Amino acid sequence: MKKVHHLLKRSILQLIDSFYPWFRRLMPLETFRYAACGGGNTLLNLAIYVFSLHFIFDKQVFHVPFLPLAFEPHIAAYLLAFFVTFPSGFYLSMFVVFPESALRRRIQLFRYLLVVLACMVLNYGFLKLFVDYLGWYPTPSMVLTVAMVVSFSYLSQRHFSFQKKKEGFGKATTTEVD
């Protein structure tokens, strides 16, 4: 399993880093890797959502077997996409974007979950504010919301979820946790 992990990690890094020279002047490598991984994971989320909404849940209410729960098709599709892209996003963040984090993996996972949940609340809150209370058009509201939430997410993941070990007064180690 370790061989598969190392091959996957190396392949992803080679692919992403091959495009970095075009963006070198715009952003640091870590930020580019975050944008590439986050963008790819977002596209995967959208693809799973659309596919499951139209083909798995067939626009029908989904009744959970053996439980008295039912979900509207768009919520069921959202949950399915979330349960796939949450682990893939965590994997990419942990091994591709922020491999130098010195925190234990279970701490990283818990903090990653907290940031993802905070981002979900921020997305909802900003859209409600911009569209419902300020009367802005939905599309520009979504663009502004995405820009703010992605910025929050990157800074939170970098400085909270995948925090580097501190030595002395703000010096960070570069040891890789693999």
Image: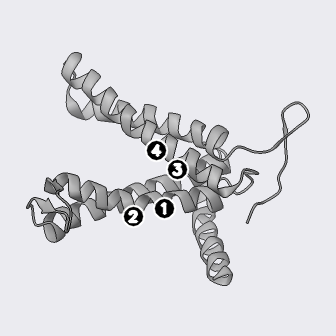
Position of residue 144 in the picture relative to residue 39 (left or right): left
- Kindly identify the residue that appears in the image at 28 percent across and 21 percent down: 129
| Number of numbered labels in the structure image | 4
For mark 1, give the secondary structure: helix
Drawn side of residue 40 relative to residue 57, left or right: right
Is there a contact, CB below 8 Å, between mark 1 and mark 2? yes
Instruction: Tell which circle, 2 or 3, labels the residue nearer the N-terminal end.
Output: 3
Check disc 1: other Cα within 10 Å, few if <14, some if 14-19, many if 20+: few
Amino acid at dot 2: Val
Q: Amino acid at mark 1?
A: Pro
For residue 87, which numbered disc appears in the image? 1
The percent position of residue 132, horizontal first and vertical second, equals 19, 22
Residue 5's mark?
none
Tell whether label 2 touches label 4 (CB within 8 Å): no
- Label 4 SS: helix
**Image quadrant for the N terminus?**
bottom right
- Vertical position of residue 90 compared to residue 28: above or below: below
**Of the residues under marks 4 and 3, which one precedes in the sequence?**
3
- Cα separation, mark 2 vs mark 3, equals 19 Å
Choose mark 4 or mark 3, whichever is in front.
Answer: 4
